[in-house]
Image: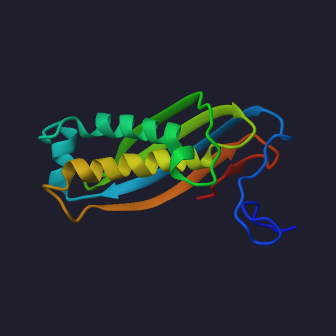
Amino acid sequence: MNPLSHFDDSGASRMVDTSGKAETERVARASGWVRMNPATAALIRDRKVSKGDVLEVARLAGILAAKKTGELIPLCHPLPITSAALDFNWEADDLLRIESTVKVVGRTGVEMEALTAVSVAALTVYDMCKSVDRVMTVERIRLEEKSGGKSGSFRRAD
């Protein structure tokens, strides 16, 4: 048996068959950073970016991305997301932390949905602010924790 579940024994790509799995509540939390000039961060915090409220647009983009993950990542299952939330915190005067939490009652986890939500939210921040700060970077997108399903829980140690 191939240890990579998205490939069959001959190496062909496949969508994993989840029909035999039990439906359970599954939760995933992911995070990422957008690093920017302090002046850009001030514009975002003060809601003075000409395109609008950057964090609220990014929140909506992240929620939509979580719901559309099955359309973006070729072998992801389309899932009936029951909850998707994004939070923003300023870790420093030049560093925005984005965190998503996604839930589903289903046969497969929502790790990819949480990661996609953070990624698209971060890219939305970049898109809305690129006219004033082209050196912004999207950094450290990662799974923080997940629960539910056969493989059990995971929580990042650091």
The residue lying at 55 percent from left, 29 percent from top is: 83
Q: Nearer the viewer, residue 144 or 64?
A: 64
Q: Percent position (x, y) of residue 44?
A: 21, 43
Percent x, y for residue 4?
75, 66
Q: Count how many numbered circles sit on residues in the image.
A: 0
The answer to which of 8 and 62 lies nearer the viewer is 8
Residue at the (16%, 40%) spot, across then down:
51
* Picture quadrant of residue 88: top left
Q: Relative to 154, is 71 on the left or the right?
A: left
Q: Is residue 11 above or below residue 151?
A: below
Query: In this image, 142 relative to 129: left or right?
Result: right
| Quarter of the image that includes the N terminus | bottom right
Front residue of this view, candidates 121 and 19: 19
Q: Compared to 117, does 6 lie above or below?
A: below
Left/right of residue 133 with respect to residue 155 in the rendered view: left
State the residue at coordinates (25%, 40%). Answer: 54
Residue 83 in sight: yes
